[in-house]
Image: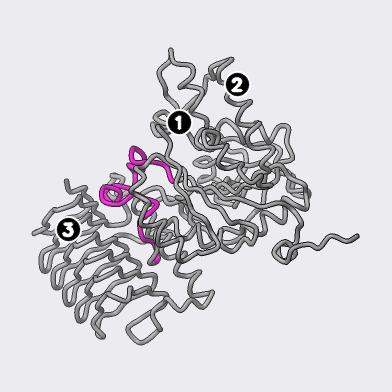
Amino acid sequence: MSLQVPLREKLNGSSGGPTKAVILVGGSSRGTRFRPLSLDVPKPLFDVAGHPIIWHCLTAINKVPSIHEVYLIGYYEESVFRDFIKDSSSEFPNLSIKYLREYQALGTAGGLYHFRDAILKGRPEHIFVLNSDVCCSFPLNEMLKLAQEKDAEAVILGTRVSEDAATNFGCIVSDAHTRRVLHYVEKPESHISNLINCGVYLFAADALFPSIRSAIKRRTDRPRLASHRSSENLASSFMIDDDDTEKSEVIRLEQDILSDMADNKQFFVYETKDFWRQIKTAGSAIPANALYLQKALQSGSNELAPPSPNIIPPVYIHPTAQVHPTAKLGPNVSIGPRATVDAGARVKESIVLEDAEIKHDACVLYSIIGWGSRVGAWARVEGTPTPVTSHNTTIVKNGVKVQAITILGKECAVGDEVRVQNCVCLPFKELKRDVANEVIM
């Protein structure tokens, strides 16, 4: 008697069980490096290339036929994602999208473990885990194929970066022939590899939670002495010493799980040759915006503005925005809802957010113009271009480290004929004189 394989599984190239996806969205106490933009909107919901950062993750997840359930895990209030989930559920009818709120910051693996019953319901075979602050092409189907070919317990997405940048990320040492991960170190002190962790993982469901459980047991039995290179890591791992239960809850995939998996598991790396970028600082939204717009251009997306003498593609203009025909836009520009760009204005490599106004003959380069902000006539708001390969959004000017990208927070006003260069301006500020290389508070 032959058993018929369902069509969806045939399409997926496997008769395996269902797959689920988890997107880690963090919480309001994080995202401080994304200020001043995260003062008004949570980083995962910030618009890049015309859509929230997290929407790009969902678009990729929707292309995996075996995924029907997606969980967003973080510790924002439930109300924060309510509208986004409602809109996304109608846009991606194949996906059931739910938000699971942590009662406190539990770490990237701690949150997964806390909601293990919900994630394991329906007995998924594989679980994708994506960090929301990652910009890439998300080759999820390819990762799933590798996992099935190798019978892997874990597959990590990796990419090559320059050797000097590599130590800022988790570094992977792998067997070039079998693609097996031999060694994993989070932010090593010295160079070990230029193949880095992209923050996108695929786990076999029956391997993930036992690994987290053993990490919790190790933590409880023997509190770990770890060196923390940054205050960010310190903040995420420091707990009150005399409360072992609380301490054991903060478990991070990168520091506590992956290095252990590399030692004794079927752990493989899928190396992407496509674009990859981390969206950590507010300025990093500009290169991410460019990468997603270029991807939309290559895939022939009908969301982009058609090229013309005054539109240098790729350019995204929201249907409700008003752009004067003599204004010149592009490349790599996103214009948000109800924004206006007046006659003769020039906008390049920038994001103009909702309700912002750029008056006639103004120039905006390598900048983010905040919600409801106004750039006066003949004003110039500009940042400094950074190399495409650079993962850093700061530059050194006159011996001082400054933001390469100029950022105006919500409802800022730049006066007529005023020049603003390499500045970060907090919300509700009015700039009446030329200013450069400053944080305006």
The secondary structure type at the circle numbered 2 is: helix
Colouring mode (rainbow / by chain / secondary structure / one colour): one colour
User: As shown in the figure, which amino acid type bears the numbered disc 3?
Assistant: Glu
- For marks 3 and 2, the one nearer the N-term is 2
Q: Residue at x 62, y 42 (%)?
A: 193
Nearer the observer: mark 1 or 3; the answer is 3
Q: Is residue 264 toward the left or the right of residue 272 in the image? A: right
User: As shown in the figure, which amino acid type bears the numbered disc 2?
Assistant: Lys
Give the spatial CA distance, label 2 vs label 1.
Answer: 25 Å
Q: Residue at x 72, y 61 (%)?
A: 9
Give the spatial CA distance, label 3 vs label 2.
Answer: 50 Å
Quadrant position of the N terminus in the picture: bottom right
Q: Are marks 2 and 1 in contact (CB under 8 Å)?
A: no
Residue count near mark 2 (Cα–Cα under 10 Å), binned few <14, some 14–19, many ≥20: few
The secondary structure type at the circle numbered 1 is: loop
Residue annotated with mark 3: 411
Judging depth in this view, the residue of 379 and 6 nearest the camera is: 6
- For marks 2 and 1, the one nearer the N-term is 2
Q: Is residue 396 toward the left or the right of residue 178 in the image? A: left
Residue annotated with mark 2: 217
Q: Residue at x 51, y 48 (%)?
A: 71
Judging depth in this view, the residue of 279 and 15 nearest the camera is: 15
Residue annotated with mark 1: 229
- For marks 1 and 3, the one nearer the N-term is 1
User: As shown in the figure, which amino acid type bears the numbered disc 1?
Assistant: Arg
Residue count near mark 1 (Cα–Cα under 10 Å), binned few <14, some 14–19, many ≥20: few
Q: In this figure, what is the number of numbered marks?
A: 3
Give percent across and percent down for residue 254: 55, 36
Q: Which residues are magenta?
A: 25-49
Q: Residue furthest right?
A: 1
Give the spatial CA distance, label 1 vs label 3.
Answer: 36 Å
Give percent across and percent down for residue 47: 36, 60
